Amino acid sequence: MSLSRPRCGDARNRTDAVLAVHSPRVVVNFTGGAPTEEMRAKAVERGLERADRLISSYILKMGAEPALLGLARHHQVRDMHILSREEIARFGIDRRELAETPWTFENSARGVIGKVAVQTDGGDKSYHTSLMALVCFNADQFELDFQRKALANASLAAVSMSNGVRSRCFLTPVRSKLPGSEFWSLADRSCLAAVAGGPCAIRGAETWQTPDGQRQPHTVKFSSEGLSGALDRLLTTCPPAKSLAAPSTATPLASRDSAVK
């Protein structure tokens, strides 16, 4: 199995940041003598009023909800409130149903490239985090791993990947050591080649059965931002194939001029 550089446009999504809010902090400086406590209190009050006006104006300009300032007022700098993904959407800071990191390379025990995506479940608009990783065991062995939060009140779940051209490749469920998480894996060479050989994105589909027997589908398109450079670095650290057998004629994992968030 071989890899080559994908060439696609970059997406501009980010999910690798933490957003927190807190109330304004006013620092008063007096000149011309020591102020009384009453003077200091009034100066702080005027400063807070001015800060509220500035922040309110900024919130409106960015298209967010004014209630965000109300939340911030309840938290001092020392105990700032970290916004959940649901709050970020509810207050109008970012209402996207999908936000994802670029593909990045990490070389620890073995070479791996991966990405993180935060997305809605599609029904109740709650968000969950998914992790994807392409692992290199040697030049002939690659594995695509997918991890997500375990779905409550769901059964007969399935996860598949495709390139938008050929039929879907279904991942195999693997026992997860992390409570509340589900883990899926794809090691089939032809499927990996097909999934990675699509036009600029990898399409993932999750389905599960609700207690009333209905199948619930959810499809997402992951971008390939950062994948080109990450694959280059992965290939330079991937150990040589252990087998001395004749080379396989399987489709290369990423042979494309316009191909694979």
Image: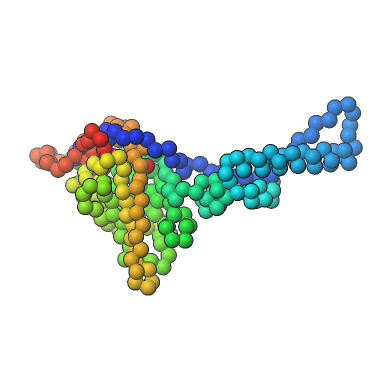
**In this picture, residue 199 sits left or right of residue 182:** left
Give the residue at x 31% y 43%. 201
The x and y percentages for residue 115 are 38, 43
The x and y percentages for residue 106 are 37, 37
Give the residue at x 37% y 35%. 10
Residue 226 can be seen, yes or no: no
Give the residue at x 29% y 33%. 7
The x and y percentages for residue 4 are 24, 34
Q: Residue furthest bottom?
A: 212
**In this picture, residue 132 sits left or right of residue 89:** left
Q: How many marks?
A: 0
Question: Please, is residue 52 above or below residue 152 in the view?
Answer: above
**Where is residue 152, by image quadrant?**
bottom left
The x and y percentages for residue 220 are 36, 51
**In this picture, residue 88 sits left or right of residue 205:** right
Q: Quadrant of the N terminus?
A: top left
Give the residue at x 46% y 54%. 127
Question: Please, is residue 208 above or below residue 211 in the view?
Answer: above
Q: Residue furthest top?
A: 32
Q: Residue furthest left?
A: 246
Question: Please, is residue 183 above or below residue 20 in the view?
Answer: below
**Where is residue 157, by image quadrant?**
bottom left
Q: Quadrant of the C terminus?
A: top left
**In this picture, residue 187 sits left or right of residue 42:** left
Q: How is the image coloured?
A: rainbow
Q: Nearer the viewer, residue 112 or 13?
A: 13
Residue 7 can be seen, yes or no: yes
Q: Nearer the viewer, residue 164 or 60?
A: 60
